[in-house]
Image: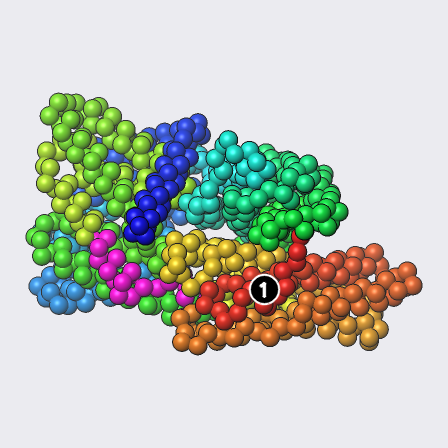
C-alpha cells in the first residue's frame, strides 16, 4: 500500500512538472507582435549575411554558423567596437595557426598547447568581460588546432574563410544597427520589466481570489521557471555593451532587483494562499483584504504602465502607493479589532498562515511604496584601474580553477574528436567552450538547453535535406529554408532565459549542419555533428557536475565580501569616501558586482538542494546592499562638496558613533564570510556574528535627531540653506540606513543554508 502511494505521488509530481513545462512554453512562445518583428529583423540580417558569405565564395564550414552567432549574440554594434573585435580575432587566429602548424607532428605538445590556449583565453575573456566576442575568438581558433590533423595544408584557407565570414557578419550587423534597422536594448529591457510586473500583478490577484474562497479558477503555482531574472540580466548586459551611462546602469539594476523581489514575495503569498486550511480569519477580514490587494494591484499596474516610458526612478511616493499603505494599515487595525474573536476558534495553523499572508502583503507594500534610490552621482564612465585590479585579484582563485577545468575538458574533447577520424566532430570543442560555465547551476541550464536546441536544430536540418535538396534547385528555395529556420530560432531566442538559449541553438545547429545556400545531401555529416554536441556535453557534465563541481555558493563568497568591503569603504573617514573619484569607483564596483551576484542567485535556484545558499535571501541582500551603498555614497559626496558649520563636541561624537555602529555591523558580516575562506562546505559551520539589537542604531539616530532639533534647530540656525539641507539629508539617510541594516542582518544571516542557527534566532521578525 505504501509503495502504491509512493508511486502515485511520483506520478502526480511528474504530471505537475509536465503541466509547469506546458505552461512555461505556452507563456514563452505566445503570440507577441514585437517579438515577431524582432525575430523578422534577426532572421533577415542572418539570411542576408549568409547570402553575402556565399556570394563571396568564403571557404570553410563555419561561414553560416559564424554569421548566425554574430547576429544572435551581439548587442547593438558600433563600428569601432566591431573593428576591435575583428582585429583581436585576427591576432588569435594568427597565433593559433602558427602553434597548430608548428606542433602538428608532436601530438603531446599539441595537447599541451590546446590546454594552455584554452586555459589562458578563458581567463582573459572572463576577467575582461569579453562575453560572446571571447567565445567567438575561441571557436575560430580551436578550429585550426582540430583541422590541422585532417588537412594541414588547408588550415590557412580555412582560417581565412572564418576571418572573412566574421568580418562580413560584423559589417552587416553594424550597417543594420547604425543605419538600416536599429534596435537598442534599453527599450526592450523596460518593456520586459513592465511585462514582468504585469505578470506578478496577475498572479497576486488570482492567488488572493483563490485565498478568499473562489476555487473555480486554478491558483498560480510557485515555480522557479516563472522568474524573469535571467532575461533581465541578459538584457542589462546588452544595455551595458551599448554604452549606457553609469547612472542609468545603476537605475536599471535597481529596477531589476525590485522586480525580482516582488516576484519572490508573490511566490510566498501564493504558497500561503493555496494551503488547504480553514477560512475563519479571512472571512472576517475579507473586505479589508480585498481593498488592500486592489490598492496593491493598482500600484503594480501603474508601475507596469510607466516602465516602458520612464527611467524607473522618482523623488516622491505616488498617490496609489500611499493608498496601498493606508489600506494595509486599515487591514492591520481591523485585524486587531477582531483578533479576540478569532483567536479562540481558529486553529494555530490558520493563525500562522494568515500571519504569513499578511507579512507578504506588508513586504509588497514596502517594495512598491518607496521609489528607487537615486544613485550616487557618477563623474566618469569607468572606475580607476586600481580598484578594478583589486577586484580581479580577489576573484582570481575561482577564475583560475574554472580556466583549468575548461582547458582539461577541451583536451578530452580534442582527443575524443580525433579518435573518430571525423572532421565534423570539431563541434565537440565548440560545445565545451559554450557549456563550460563557472557554476553548477549555470552549466546544468546551458547543457540542457543546448541538447534540446541541438536536437530540434538537427531535426530541422534533416527535414531540409530530405525535402529541399531533392525537390528544389534554385537559390531562392535555399534562402527561404534558411530564413524560415532562422526565424523560428530567433523568435524562440527572444523568450526569457528559461528557454532562450535553446531557441538560439536551433539556428546554431542548423547552420553547422546544413551549411550555406547550396544543396546538402550528406545525412551522415549532420548526424556526426549532433553526436559531437552530445559527446561534448557529456564531457562537461562529467568534469563540471560530478568530478569537480563549483557551486554557486563558492562563487558568491568573494563577490559578497567585495560588496561589503566596498560599502565599508564609503563610510565617512574611509579612503574611498575622501574624494569624488573614490566614491565613484567604489559605487561602480558595487553595482557591477551586484549584477554578478544576481546571476549567481539565478544559478543557485537551478542547483536545488545541492546549493549551499538560499536564492531568495541572496536576491534580497543584493537589493538591500545596493540601497545601503547608494545612501553611503550620497552622504560621502555631500560631505566632500559642502563644508557644514560647526557642531558642538557632543553632537560630533553622537554623529560619529552612529557611523561606527554601522561599520561594526558590516565588519562583523565581512568577518563571518571571510571565515569560510574559499568554500561554504566546512566540517564546522561558522558561527553567526554576535550582533547587538536593532535598538542600538535606533538610539544613536534618535539621539542625533534630538540634538539637531533641540530649541527649534538652534544648533544649525546660523548655517546657510545648503549646509542645513546637507545635515538634514544625512539625518534622513541615517534613519533609512537604520532600517536597511536591520533588513540586511536578516538576509545575510539566511544566505548560508548550512548555518548553525535559524534566521529568527538572530534577528526578530516583526509580526503583521
Q: Main secondary structure of the magenta part?
A: helix
The residue singled out by tag 1 in the image is 760
Is residue 544 magenta-colored?
yes
Placement of 656 over or under 157, stated as above or below: below
86 left or right, relative to 240: left
320 left or right, relative to 617: right
Tell me which corner region of the image, top left, top right, bottom left or bottom right, holds residue 288. top right
Tell me which corner region of the image, top left, top right, bottom left or bottom right, holds residue 679. bottom left
State the SS at label 1: helix
570 left or right, relative to 735: left
Percent position (x, y) of residue 749? 54, 66
Percent position (x, y) of residue 452? 27, 43
Q: What is the span of residues highlighted in magenta in the rendered image? A: 536-558
Placement of 390 over or under 36, stated as above or below: below
**Residue extending farthest front:** 1
Dot 1 alpha-carbon crowd within 10 angstroms: few under 14, some 14 to 19, many 20 or more: few
Q: Nearer the viewer, residue 500 or 64?
A: 500
Query: What residue appears at the point 11 percent right and 65 percent down from the top-left corner?
Result: 107
Q: Is residue 610 visible?
A: yes
Percent position (x, y) of residue 120? 30, 64
Q: Nearer the viewer, residue 749 or 335?
A: 335
Is residue 364 magenta-colored?
no
604 left or right, relative to 636: left
Percent position (x, y) of residue 434? 29, 52
Q: Nearer the viewer, residue 495 or 207?
A: 207
Amino acid at each position: 500500500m505504501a509503495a502504491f502511494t509512493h508511486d502515485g505521488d511520483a506520478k502526480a509530481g511528474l504530471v505537475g512538472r509536465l503541466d509547469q513545462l506546458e505552461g512555461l512554453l505556452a507563456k514563452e512562445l505566445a503570440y507577441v507582435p514585437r517579438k515577431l518583428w524582432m525575430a523578422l529583423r534577426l532572421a533577415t540580417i542572418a539570411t542576408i549575411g549568409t547570402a553575402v558569405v556565399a556570394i563571396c565564395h568564403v571557404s570553410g564550414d563555419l561561414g553560416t554558423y559564424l554569421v548566425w552567432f554574430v547576429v544572435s549574440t551581439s548587442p547593438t554594434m558600433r563600428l569601432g567596437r566591431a573593428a576591435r573585435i575583428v582585429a583581436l580575432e585576427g591576432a588569435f587566429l594568427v597565433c593559433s595557426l602558427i602553434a597548430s602548424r608548428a606542433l602538428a607532428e608532436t601530438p603531446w605538445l599539441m595537447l599541451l598547447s590546446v590546454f594552455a590556449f584554452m586555459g589562458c583565453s578563458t581567463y582573459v575573456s572572463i576577467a575582461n568581460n569579453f562575453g560572446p566576442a571571447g567565445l567567438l575568438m575561441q571557436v575560430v581558433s580551436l578550429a585550426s588546432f582540430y583541422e590541422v590533423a585532417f588537412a594541414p595544408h588547408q588550415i590557412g584557407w580555412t582560417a581565412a574563410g572564418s576571418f572573412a565570414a566574421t568580418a562580413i557578419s560584423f559589417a552587416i550587423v553594424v550597417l543594420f544597427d547604425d543605419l538600416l534597422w536599429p534596435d537598442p536594448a534599453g527599450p526592450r529591457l523596460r518593456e520586459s520589466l513592465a511585462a514582468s510586473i504585469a505578470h506578478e500583478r496577475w498572479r497576486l490577484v488570482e492567488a488572493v481570489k483563490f485565498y478568499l474562497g473562489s476555487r473555480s479558477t486554478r491558483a498560480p503555482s510557485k515555480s522557479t521557471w516563472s522568474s524573469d531574472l535571467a532575461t533581465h540580466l541578459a538584457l542589462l548586459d546588452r544595455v551595458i555593451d551599448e554604452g549606457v551611462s553609469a547612472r542609468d546602469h545603476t537605475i536599471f539594476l535597481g529596477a531589476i532587483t525590485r522586480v525580482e523581489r516582488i516576484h519572490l514575495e508573490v511566490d510566498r503569498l501564493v504558497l500561503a494562499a493555496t494551503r488547504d486550511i480553514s477560512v475563519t480569519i479571512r472571512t472576517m477580514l475579507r473586505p479589508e483584504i480585498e481593498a488592500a490587494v486592489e490598492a496593491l494591484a493598482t500600484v503594480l499596474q501603474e508601475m507596469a504602465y510607466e516602465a516602458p516610458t520612464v527611467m524607473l526612478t522618482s523623488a516622491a511616493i505616488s498617490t496609489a502607493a500611499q493608498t496601498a499603505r493606508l489600506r494595509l494599515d486599515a487591514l492591520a487595525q481591523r485585524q486587531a479589532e477582531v483578533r479576540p474573536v478569532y483567536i479562540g476558534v481558529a486553529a494555530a495553523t490558520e493563525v500562522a498562515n494568515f500571519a504569513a499572508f499578511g507579512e507578504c502583503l506588508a513586504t509588497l507594500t514596502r517594495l512598491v511604496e518607496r521609489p528607487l534610490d537615486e544613485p550616487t552621482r557618477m563623474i566618469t564612465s569607468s572606475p580607476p584601474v586600481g580598484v578594478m585590479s583589486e577586484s580581479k585579484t580577489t576573484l582570481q582563485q575561482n577564475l583560475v580553477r574554472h580556466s583549468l577545468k575548461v582547458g582539461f575538458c577541451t583536451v578530452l574533447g580534442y582527443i575524443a574528436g580525433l579518435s573518430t577520424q571525423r572532421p565534423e566532430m570539431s563541434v565537440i570543442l565548440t560545445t565545451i567552450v559554450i557549456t563550460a560555465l563557472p557554476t553548477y547551476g549555470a552549466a546544468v541550464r546551458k547543457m540542457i538547453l543546448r541538447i534540446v536546441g541541438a536536437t530540434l536544430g538537427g531535426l530541422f536540418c534533416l527535414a531540409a535535406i530530405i525535402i529541399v535538396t531533392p525537390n528544389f534547385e534554385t537559390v531562392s528555395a535555399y534562402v527561404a529554408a534558411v530564413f524560415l529556420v532562422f526565424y523560428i530560432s530567433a523568435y524562440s531566442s527572444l523568450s526569457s532565459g528559461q528557454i532562450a538559449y535553446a531557441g538560439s541553438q536551433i539556428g546554431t545547429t542548423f547552420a553547422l549542419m546544413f551549411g550555406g545556400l547550396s544543396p546538402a545531401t550528406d545525412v551522415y555529416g549532420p548526424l556526426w555533428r549532433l553526436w559531437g554536441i552530445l559527446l561534448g556535453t557529456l564531457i562537461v557534465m562529467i568534469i563540471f557536475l560530478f568530478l569537480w563541481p563549483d557551486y554557486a555558493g563558492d562563487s558568491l563568497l568573494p563577490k559578497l565580501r567585495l560588496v561589503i568591503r566596498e560599502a565599508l569603504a564609503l563610510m565617512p573617514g574611509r579612503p574611498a569616501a575622501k574624494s569624488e573619484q573614490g566614491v565613484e569607483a567604489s559605487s561602480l564596483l558595487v553595482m557591477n558586482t551586484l549584477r554578478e551576484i544576481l546571476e549567481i542567485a539565478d544559478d543557485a535556484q537551478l542547483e536545488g538542494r545541492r546549493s549551499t545558499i538560499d536564492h531568495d535571501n541572496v536576491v534580497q541582500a543584493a537589493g538591500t546592499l545596493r540601497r545601503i551603498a547608494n545612501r553611503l555614497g550620497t552622504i560621502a559626496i555631500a560631505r566632500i562638496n559642502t563644508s557644514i558649520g560647526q557642531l558642538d563636541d557632543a553632537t560630533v561624537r553622537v554623529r560619529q558613533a552612529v557611523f561606527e555602529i554601522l561599520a561594526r555591523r558590516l565588519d562583523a558580516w565581512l568577518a563571518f564570510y571571510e571565515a569560510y575562506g574559499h568554500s561554504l562546505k566546512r566540517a564546522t559551520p561558522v558561527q553567526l556574528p554576535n550582533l547587538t539589537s536593532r535598538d542600538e542604531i535606533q538610539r544613536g539616530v534618535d539621539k542625533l535627531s534630538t540634538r539637531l532639533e533641540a530649541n527649534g534647530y538652534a544648533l544649525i540656525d546660523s548655517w546657510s540653506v545648503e549646509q542645513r539641507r546637507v545635515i538634514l539629508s544625512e539625518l534622513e539617510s541615517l534613519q533609512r540606513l537604520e532600517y536597511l541594516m536591520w533588513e540586511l542582518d536578516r538576509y545575510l544571516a539566511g544566505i548560508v543554508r548550512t548555518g548553525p542557527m535559524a534566521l529568527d534566532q538572530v534577528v526578530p521578525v516583526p509580526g503583521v
